[in-house]
Image (spheres, rainbow, N blue to C red):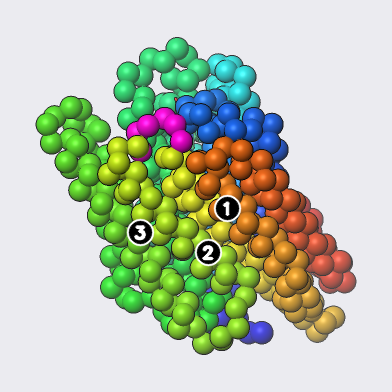
Amino acid sequence: MSLPPGLSFAQAPPIMVPFRFFLSAPLFALLVALLALWFGPSLLESRWQPSVLALTHLMTLGFLSMVMVGAMLQMLPVIAGSPVAHPVGVARAVHLLLVSGVLFLAAGFLLASPWLMLLAMVLLGGGLLVFVIAVGFSLARAASGNPTVVGMRFALVSLTVTAILGLVLASNFGWKWWLISWIQVTNLHLTWGLLGWVGLLVISVSYQVVPMFQLTPAYPKLLMRWLPRALFVLLLLGSIPWLLADSGMQEQVAIVVALITVAVLALFALATLRLQSQRRRKQSDVTLLFWRFGMVCLLLALALSIVGQAMKISDNAHGENFMPIFLFVAGFAVSVVNGMLYKIVPFLIWFHLQSLLMGVAKVPNMRQIMPEAGMRRQMWLHFLAVPLLGLSALWPLLIYPAAVLFGVSMVLLEFNLLSAFRVYRKHAKLAPKNDLQTI
Ligand code: HEM
């Protein structure tokens, strides 16, 4: 296998920079499954329960953001040619602060403890600040015309907005509800988190990884240029009605902006599905199937959120409004991230071994590093868990089989990642000089 053209791996950081994040993430998702089994159908009673808020953040910060942060630290030198300064120190600090911060945040919600909440705010605020500054400098230096870099910049700003709103909400949660319009602030926080941070990063990264790993044609230039910009402007416009308090126009503006946002995201999903249908190699692989499943879930989530809005159930605290959010987070975001891990991890191991063992020993190929059968087993468990999770919004008892399947799938994901990492360690020891000491 040769390196894809246009990418520079010369400045790639040591392997543990991204891997410490990748290996931790499935453990948080496993915790989500265990807590979902513990709380059971009561979770579906209201989105404002501490248990739901704890699970939400174990998933969005503990799993999704954990992988996304690691992937960004890895990808910046490769895609943007602009490495993060002191990558090992930054990765160690951000990882430690993020892991402990998420655990304290979840505990703060579950135990309704202002002091745990305060600790979580310091740890998460500190970790995300280090990350935003380190990656912000690197993105500021990068070539500005690259659509992936542009999208990543918007995603980073979105993460900053999400974190600031999250910290405001956490102070409100811990200290007696000083914030009057906290429901609006929560909705703003989750919109910037899910559509801005998660959505914009997936979109901008897909411009590189879908053609490269799934052997499809490139995304159309116009779409690459305008889609992230449009989504970011829509997020800004969508925030204005909340700032204008109850002026008469508020609801109409919000509906129009929401509909255009849905159309933009649907365009991305449809364009990706179309490119996948035009790929050069007709054989399906696990990453392709994960992405395809993710795009279908995104389309379903968008359609259901419109239906929910039209039927005025989306502001209702009960039942059906969980379905689009489950489909977005577990169906779209987790699938895409999971599929990505199955390409990035074997590729990085292969790449690092290649540079360590050149002329010394034979490097295993990507299939030997991450066997297809193990990935497929985990994928099918995930594909079964997501529909059950979505339907648990209507039949809450389904949360039990959904949590079991999701939990087992995350155990298998961790197992697959660790097995691949073991291959790396075994072979890296043969090299005269390796980067295992950076662990
Ligand atoms: C510094 C990091 C963060 C902190 C301190 C934080 C804090 C909070 C708090 C306190 C709430 C509850 C509001 C309330 O009910 O009073 C909340 C809600 C929420 N947050 Fe975060 N958050 C953070 C990051 C994120 C990120 C990165 C995402 C998504 C990618 C996210 C997604 C959500 C969602 C979806 C809800 C709504 C949950 C529901 O309606 O049940 N948060 N956040």
Please name which of the two marks, 1 or 3, marks the residue nearer to the observer: 1
Q: Main secondary structure of the magenta part?
A: loop
Q: How crowded is mark 1: few (under 14 residues within 10 Å), some or many (20 or more)?
A: many
How many numbered markers are drawn? 3
Instruction: Tell whether label 2 touches label 1 (CB within 8 Å).
Output: yes
Q: Can residue 156 be seen in this view?
A: no
SS label for mark 2: helix
Q: Position of residue 439 (x, y in %)?
A: 76, 52
Q: Mark 1 points at which residue?
A: 386
- Residue 159 in percent (x, y) is at 43, 44
Residue stretch rendered in magenta on the structure: 314-319
Of residues 173 and 72, the one nearer the viewer is 173
Q: Which of 110 and 92 is in front in this view?
A: 110
Q: Which amino acid does label 2 sit on?
A: Phe
Left or right for 278, reference 61: left
**Foreground tag (2 vs 3):** 2
- Give the side of residue 378 with respect to residue 235, left or right: right
The image's mark for residue 293 is 2
Reading the image, the residue beneath label 3 is: 265
Q: Which residue is drawn at 51% across and 68% down?
A: 292
Residue at position x 48%, y 29% from top?
46
Q: Which residue lies furthest to the left in this view?
A: 248
Residue 201 placement, left or right of 96: left
Q: Earlier in the sequence, mark 2 or mark 3?
A: 3
Q: Where is residue 335 in the image (x, y as percent from the top left)?
A: 56, 58
N-terminal of the pair, mark 1 or mark 2, is 2
Q: How far apart are marks 1 and 2 (CA)?
A: 10 Å
Element type at marker 3? helix
Is the residue marked by circle 3 packed among few (<14), some (14-19), or many (20+) residues within 10 Å?
Answer: many
Amino acid type of the residue tagged 1 in the rendering: Val
What is the spatial separation of the Cα atoms under label 1 and label 3, in whole angstroms?
Answer: 20 Å
